[in-house]
């Protein structure tokens, strides 16, 4: 009886200990859906536990390599675990249009594309899909080395905060980043009165 008890106790410790270690950094998330690992001090995200994710629809995450940058807010991802390539439209931002199918583009369209290339082209990134699509493209948040790449585009002055579709907790961060980029005349904000891409597209459709 005693040997059986010791065996069971040892088995429980063996099973429970790794589980405890795996969740030793658990705790309350901040407004960005992340927190610091108490053991390593590294900051990381838990979007699967975040109630303020951009959509209540089905969402998922994966690691993938950025195979192509189509413009300042659209990339092609190759999942590391296999599967088909897919096109990802960056959530919460809108960048100047580039010429397409004979239609003119906007100032700083190519610059925005070039900057996004410098950030992630050919690199392995963490992709969070929101569960929504637009024109066959997944709506995604992309992270590289812990940085929100969508937000980085706004900070550098190559993207507008897409207020129409932004939700908490991203709205305040992205809008504030746009204001700072505008105040500092970064990127497209070197222009006196740049036309937002959504207005530019509407004008093109109505011509």
Image (cartoon, grey):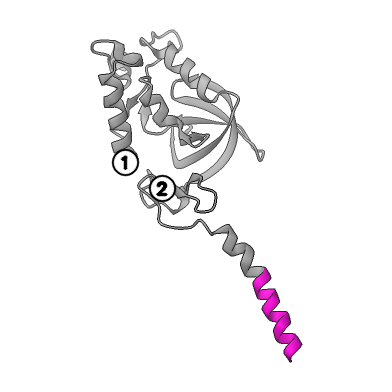
Residue 206 lies in quadrant: top left
Question: Where's residue 85, x and y in %?
Answer: 60, 31
Identity of the residue drawn at 50% across and 47% down:
41
In the rendered image, residue 186, in percent from the top left (x then y), is placed at: 33, 16
Q: Position of residue 170 (x, y in %)?
A: 34, 39
Res. 105 visible in picture: yes
Which region is colored magenta? 1-14
Crowd rating for badge 2 (residues with CA inside 10 Å; few <14, some 14–19, many 20+): some
Say whether residue 182 is left or right of residue 91. left
Q: Which residue is mark 2?
A: 33
Q: Which one is earlier in the sequence, the residue at label 2 or at label 1?
A: 2
Please report contact status of discs 2 and 1: CB closer than 8 Å, yes or no.
no
Q: Which residue is mark 1?
A: 167
Main SS, magenta region, reads helix
15 versus 33 height, above or below: below
Quarter placement of the C terminus? top left
- Magenta stretch: residue 10 in it? yes
Q: Quadrant of residue 7?
A: bottom right
Q: Residue drawn 51% across and 45% down?
A: 42
Looking at this view, name the residue that lies furthest to the left: 193
Q: Is residue 177 above or below residue 3?
A: above
């Amino acid at each position: 009886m005693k040997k059986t008890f010791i065996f069971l106790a040892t088995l429980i410790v063996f099973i429970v200990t790794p589980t405890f270690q795996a969740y030793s950094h658990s705790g309350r998330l901040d407004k960005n859906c992340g927190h610091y690992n108490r053991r390593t001090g590294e900051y990381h995200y838990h979007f699967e536990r975040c109630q303020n994710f951009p959509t209540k629809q089905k969402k998922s995450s994966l690691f993938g390599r950025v195979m192509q940058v189509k413009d300042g807010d659209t990339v092609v991802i190759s999942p590391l675990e296999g599967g088909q390539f897919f096109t990802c439209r960056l959530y919460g931002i809108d960048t100047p249009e580039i010429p397409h199918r004979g239609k003119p583009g906007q100032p700083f369209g190519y610059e925005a594309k070039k900057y996004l290339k410098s950030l992630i082209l050919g690199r392995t990134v963490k992709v969070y899909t929101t569960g929504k699509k637009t024109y066959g493209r997944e709506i995604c948040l992309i992270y590289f080395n812990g940085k929100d790449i969508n937000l980085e585009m706004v900070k550098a002055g190559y993207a507008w905060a897409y207020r129409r579709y932004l939700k908490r907790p991203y709205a305040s961060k992205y809008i504030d980043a746009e204001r700072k980029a505008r105040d500092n005349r970064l990127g497209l904000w070197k222009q006196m009165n740049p036309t937002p891409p959504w207005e530019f597209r509407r004008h093109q459709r109505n011509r």
